[in-house]
Image (cartoon, rainbow, N blue to C red):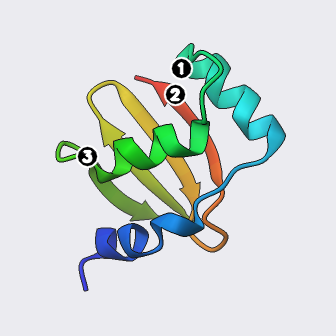
Amino acid sequence: MNNSKVLINNIENLHTTELGIKRIRKNLELPDINVVNFCKNIILGNNCKIWKQGKNWYCKTYNIIITINSYSYTIITAHKT
């Protein structure tokens, strides 16, 4: 199975912490929106490149990179490139 399919098949397991929400909103300059749903939409988009390196998944689209722990599916951070 393609590595990216593992993440996509587990997309409903994505979550983050309260600190993660604050960090992602700050880094991406997001309004008060659901950060997890925002990240899910990016990951499921046609232009998203997904790869696994070490213990993390990386999802890149346009100027955003999302980092996800591959064991717990916790969104660690997201930032602009």
Q: Is residue 79 shown left or right of residue 69? A: left
Question: SS for tag 2?
Answer: strand
Residue 48: x and y, percent?
26, 46
Which residue position holds label 3?
A: 45
Give the residue at x 58% y 60%. 14
31 vs 69, nearest the viewer: 31
* Residue type (three-letter) at the residue carrying disc 1: Leu
Please tell me which of labels 3 and 2 falls first in the chain: 3
- Residue furthest bottom in the image: 1
Quadrant of the rendered image containing residue 73: bottom right
The answer to whether the residue labelled 1 contacts the one labelled 2, judged by CB atoms less than 8 Å apart, is: yes
Which residue position holds label 2?
A: 79
> Which label is found at residue 28?
1
Are there few (<14), some (14-19), or many (20+) residues within 10 Å of tag 2? some
Give the residue at x 66% y 58%. 74
Residue 49: x and y, percent?
26, 50
Compared to 3, does 22 lie above or below? above
Quadrant of the rendered image containing residue 61: top left
Are there few (<14), some (14-19), or many (20+) residues within 10 Å of tag 1? some
